[in-house]
Amino acid sequence: MDTLLLKKEQLEIPRKTCEFIAIITLLIIFILAGGLGEAPILANDLIANSSITTPAIIQVKDKLFENIDPQAMKNKFETKVAVKYSGQKINNVSDGIKHIRMVKYYNGQPVRINVIEMNQKIASDYEVKPAIASNYTLQHKSTVRTIAGRTNSIAAVNGGYFKPQTGVPLGTLMIDGKMYTGPVYDRVALGIFEDRYEVGRVRFEGSITGNNHTIKIDNINQPRMLSSYVLAYTRDWGKYAPASPRYGVQLQIKGNKILAASANPLSIPEDGYVLVGPKSELGKLFGAEEIEMKLGTNPKWENVKHIISGGPYLVKNGNIFVDIKEEKLLSIGGRNPRTAIGYTADNNLIIVTADGREGSSIGLTLTELASLMKSLGCVNAINLDGGGSTVMYVNGQIVNQPPQAGGIALSNAVVIAKKI
């Protein structure tokens, strides 16, 4: 028996060594897991830091389990939401998606607020994306309920600005990597990636080259703002391009060839374009055997899947930032129904609507909306279309009270839909 005890003592590893081995083991797991989306922990930092002890190891272990164990991740989200919205009505839309109702008071008057908070990792069967009113052309309008039903969406809100007469979106709109419309006044937009979100003011960058001339393309599928602009139109606009400006011309393009030129509206080819602009510019391309077109945005946002435009900024890099003048949106000031979208430091999506224009809910100013988005944890957030457009749809129901029952017909929406 004594001999056995002696052997056991000789084989016993000191506790500090155990802790060190545990740290290194967890570190290796972190490295193999690609850091699990977090900043890497360096071995030298752990070794040099004398305060790293067993509790620190437990914290690392817990963080690891939270990221690889779906149930632990879900429990953490549930707890965080319960604490964050304590005292409010919280509804479960689906795993990782919550709908919260609340009433806040501004100068003693009420505002009804609806919030959707989504953890994309937990709600992995769903994606956030813009959706247009019609599968055919941009010049259509539908209610949020109709758009949500057509896209089999579990939740939806109204999207960006649009031309009321036609339904054409006014601002950057990309869906599944396809650019539908370009920016207006370089307004702020939300970029939606596979695993993250980004916000920035977006500029259009386009050009066409032929006959040793490079001509700037000012926008895509947008109404003309200046007669000097060169605009590109696709079949998403319709069968025909809009009328040319005075002294203007149109070029029908498919692939790297100019198929036709005319001062009158040309038909837009499938998988092609019609360029419309001043003849003094586009005339430089007449007779070109080949042309090269480039259409894009700045920032480039490589691998971005979807872009939805709005404006102005509400929260920028964690600070309230309302650039209403710079984005030429002074007309939407005052107290109104509002819709906003943003994301938190831990990559949760936040969508908010606030009802207005009635005694039981007076609406929000943009500064109040910005403060609300920041209080909900948003590090970046933007304003979307509001007023009569403000509508939130959850599980088949309109959950807010828009000025017009059910909400007006509009151009586009932001939906949370089942992945195809």
Image (cartoon, grey):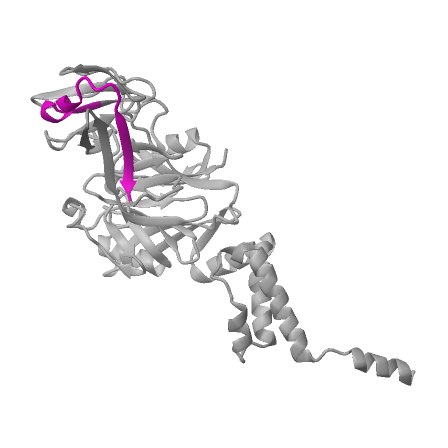
Q: Is residue 394 above or below residue 359?
A: above
Quadrant where the N terminus lies?
bottom right
The reply to whether the magenta stretch includes residue 260 is no
Foreground: 318 or 163?
318
Foreground: 47 or 235?
47
Locate residue 399: give its quadrant: top left
Q: Is residue 240 above or below residue 376?
A: above
| Residue at 31%, 39% in the rendered image | 159
Left/right placement of residue 238 relative to residue 228 reads right
| Residue at 46%, 41% in the rendered image | 127
Q: Is residue 205 above or below residue 6?
A: above
Foreground: 287 or 374?
287
Locate residue 272: give its quadrant: top left
Residue range of the region highlighted in magenta in the rendering? 275-298
Q: What is the x, y in percent for residue 370?
A: 27, 56
Left/right placement of residue 213 relative to residue 142 reads left
Left/right placement of residue 310 relative to residue 87 reads left
